[in-house]
């Protein structure tokens, strides 16, 4: 069986992207193959393509920070996954492909029935926001936090996760973004 994937041939602009058709990968021992339903498109993907992100893969590589897909094939030694199961992963590269093989530890189960494009938007944005709130800032209930760029994916996740943690959240964004996004408020107005 053949599949299509995207590769970045050298660092630079969009002209570095090529589409290739090749044999579909087969899962090795301990790997799961997933038919990709949606892959995230994020700032880190663009920065990696330009060669400036700290976790930029060596060229040539397949971009795609995160994915949502359906388990298509299970390699030897894998347990806890079923064919047809919906899963998500954030391998940092490789997701812009029809099929992806990754170690089973990279996948997490996702409830069936979610819209793939909406669900994949949660993966990088909410993990990033959670790590920054919990691991970096170590916020506690009752604290106040100001988020710049609150209208973007990570900013929106910050506001929502902070509120769930009992933090008084404030967000700033451009006037245009404020018109387009009901979650973005002037810095003097709390998000509640």
Image (cartoon, grey):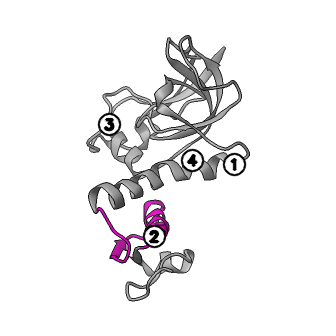
Tell me the residue that label 3 is attached to.
11
Give the crowd class for mark 4: few <14, some 14-19, many >=20 residues within 10 Å: many
Q: Nearer the viewer's eye, disc 4 or disc 1?
A: 1
How far apart, in angstroms, are the residues tagged by discs 1 and 3? Answer: 34 Å
Give the crowd class for mark 1: few <14, some 14-19, many >=20 residues within 10 Å: few
In this view, the residue in front, 144 or 123, is 144
Q: Earlier in the sequence, mark 1 or mark 3?
A: 3
Q: Nearer the viewer's eye, disc 1 or disc 3?
A: 1
Q: Earlier in the sequence, mark 3 or mark 2?
A: 3
User: Label 3 near label 1: C-beta < 8 Å?
Assistant: no
User: Label 1 near label 4: C-beta < 8 Å?
Assistant: no
How far apart, in angstroms, are the residues tagged by discs 3 and 4? Answer: 25 Å
Q: Is residue 53 left or right of residue 119?
A: left
Tell me the residue that label 1 is attached to.
114
Tell me the residue that label 4 is attached to.
120
How far apart, in angstroms, are the residues tagged by discs 3 and 2? Answer: 34 Å
Tell me the residue that label 2 is attached to.
159
In this view, the residue in front, 6 or 131, is 131
Residue 86, horizontal then vertical, whole percent: 65, 36
How far apart, in angstroms, are the residues tagged by discs 4 and 1? Answer: 10 Å
Mark 2 lies on a secondary structure that is helix
Residue 50, horizontal then vertical, whole percent: 32, 43
Please provide the residue range marked out in magenta: 138-166
**Image mark count:** 4
Residue under the image location 48 percent in, 77 percent down: 184
Does the segment drawn in magenta span residue 116? no
Mark 1 lies on a secondary structure that is loop
């Amino acid at each position: 069986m053949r599949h299509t994937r995207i590769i970045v041939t050298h660092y630079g602009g969009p002209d570095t992207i090529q589409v290739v058709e090749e044999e579909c990968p087969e899962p090795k021992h301990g790997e799961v193959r997933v038919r990709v339903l949606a892959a995230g498109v994020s700032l880190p993907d663009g920065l990696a393509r330009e060669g400036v992100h700290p976790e930029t893969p060596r060229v040539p590589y397949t971009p795609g920070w995160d994915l949502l897909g359906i388990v298509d094939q299970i390699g030897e030694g894998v347990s806890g996954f079923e064919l047809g199961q919906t899963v998500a992963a954030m391998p940092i590269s490789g997701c812009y492909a029809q099929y992806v093989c990754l170690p089973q530890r990279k996948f997490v189960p996702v409830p069936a029935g979610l819209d793939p494009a909406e669900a994949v938007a949660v993966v990088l944005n909410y993990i990033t926001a959670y790590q920054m709130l919990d691991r970096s800032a170590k916020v506690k209930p009752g604290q106040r936090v100001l988020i710049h760029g609150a209208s973007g994916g990570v900013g929106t996740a910050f506001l929502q996760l902070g509120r769930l943690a009992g933090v008084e959240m404030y967000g700033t964004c451009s006037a245009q973004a404020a018109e387009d996004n009901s979650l973005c408020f002037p810095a003097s107005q709390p998000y509640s």
